[in-house]
Image: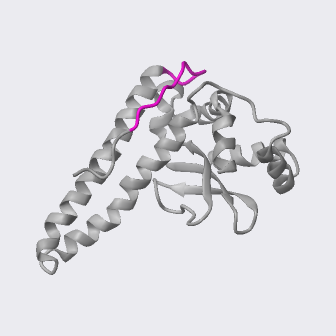
Amino acid sequence: MDYFTAKTFQIPELVGISAKNIEEHLKLYAGYVKFANQIQKDLTALSVDAEKNSYVTGELNRRFAFEHDGIRNHEAYFSQFEGGASALAEDGKLMTQIKSDFGSYDAFLARLKTLAMTRGVGWAMLYYCSDVGHLLMQWVDEQHIGHLAGPRLILAIDVWEHSYVADYHPSGKKQYIEDFFTNLNWKKVEERFEK
């Protein structure tokens, strides 16, 4: 039995990010689905002799977060392009929250882009924490290290090299981030915020 199934995404033509890059990126996402399912199957099989297999099951349990969050991060990322680019509603709840937390949309966007320029592989994430009533930005190493427990993920920027080097080369990360926001469907982000 599989726990996870790869989703399909209707991604239109994007500015700067090629269809070939998206195609290859989706294959990577499918790999996360495959390996998350495989880990669950292996854990079930190895639990027959839990004592004998304790080291292996321990390592698989550690690895599972990487595969699982690879699935969920990519689902958030790809779905943000569906339906084509759209602007953030000037009078919407998310814009109100942004202005409350960051002073202005420009200050918010500058800070989020700076986060996305963090050196290394990972994700720039925007969450909404209903416990404190604020938006939170967080760098997530790899797929899972640094993910915030509790706050709701509302925007995900994949800044692993595989997301941009085919189109932008290693030195083109800044332009990729600019194009990411050009292609972003803010309505999807607003829907996540308002859940």
The quarter holding residue 46 reads bottom left
* Residue at figure coordinates x 20%, y 69% from the top left: 56
Query: Colour scheme in the image?
Result: one colour
Q: Residue furthest top?
A: 13
Q: Is residue 178 above or below residue 51?
A: above
Secondary structure mostly taken by the magenta-highlighted segment of the chain: loop
User: Was residue 15 drawn as part of the magenta stretch in this picture?
Assistant: yes
Q: Residue furthest bottom?
A: 51
Q: How many marks?
A: 0
Q: Position of residue 80 (x, y in %)?
A: 58, 36
Residue 86 vs residue 148: left or right? right
Q: Is residue 36 above or below residue 76?
A: below
* Residue at figure coordinates x 63%, y 35% from the top left: 177
Q: Position of residue 85 (x, y in %)?
A: 66, 26
184 and 10: which is toward the camera? 10
Q: Is residue 190 above or below residue 14?
A: below
Q: Position of residue 138 (x, y in %)?
A: 63, 57
Q: Is residue 51 above or below residue 190?
A: below
* Residue at figure coordinates x 76%, y 35% from the top left: 88
83 and 29: which is toward the camera? 83
Residue 7 shows in the view: yes
Q: Residue furthest front?
A: 195
116 and 58: which is toward the camera? 58
Range of the magenta residues? 7-18
Q: Position of residue 107 (x, y in %)?
A: 83, 46
